[in-house]
Image (tube, grey):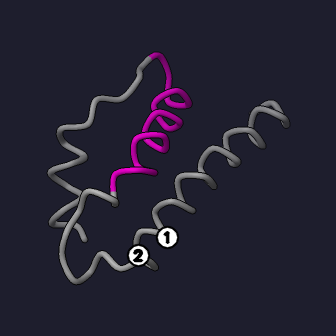
């Protein structure tokens, strides 16, 4: 997976301003990215893991904002 993710990540431009915006920006770009990757490692389960992770990142940000962190 890293062989596919690292080049993608290096090319990906994130929204800046602060770490929260960058984190949310990464999650939005990460969610659809696995659909473009090819190879035996990219099963529906692997893609689902990245989709879920991206969604959880946004929920984490919401929780942090809610508690004022």
Circle 1 residue: 49
From the top left corner, tell me how far across and down residue 51 is, in percent: 50, 59
**Which mark is drawn over residue 63?**
none
| Dominant secondary structure (helix, strand or loop) of the stretch shown in magenta | helix
- Please tell me which residue is depicted at 46% across the width and 79% down the height of the picture: 45
11 and 44: which is toward the camera: 44
Image quarter where the C terminus lies is top right
Image quarter where the N terminus lies is bottom left
- Regarding mark 2 in the picture, which secondary structure is present there? helix
What range is drawn magenta here?
17-33
- Please tell me which residue is depicted at 30% across the width and 75% down the height of the picture: 42
Circle 2 residue: 46
Q: Are marks 1 and 2 in contact (CB under 8 Å)?
A: yes
Q: Is 9 situated left or right of 33 in this image? A: left
- Residue 2 position by quadrant: bottom left
- Please tell me which residue is depicted at 28% across the width and 29% down the height of the picture: 13
Tell me how many marks there are. 2
- Please tell me which residue is depicted at 60% across the width and 52% down the height of the picture: 55
Distance, label 1 to label 2, CA atoms, is 5 Å
Q: Is 46 situated left or right of 60 in this image? A: left
The question of residue 30 being in magenta is answered with yes
From the top left corner, tell me how far across and down residue 53 is, in percent: 54, 60
């Amino acid at each position: 997976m890293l062989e596919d993710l690292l080049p993608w990540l290096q090319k990906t431009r994130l929204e800046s301003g602060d770490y929260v915006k960058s984190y949310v920006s990464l999650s939005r770009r990460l969610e659809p990215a696995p659909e473009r990757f090819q190879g035996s490692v990219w099963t529906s389960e692997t893609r689902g893991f990245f989709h879920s992770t991206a969604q959880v990142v946004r929920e984490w940000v919401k929780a942090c904002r809610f508690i004022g962190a």
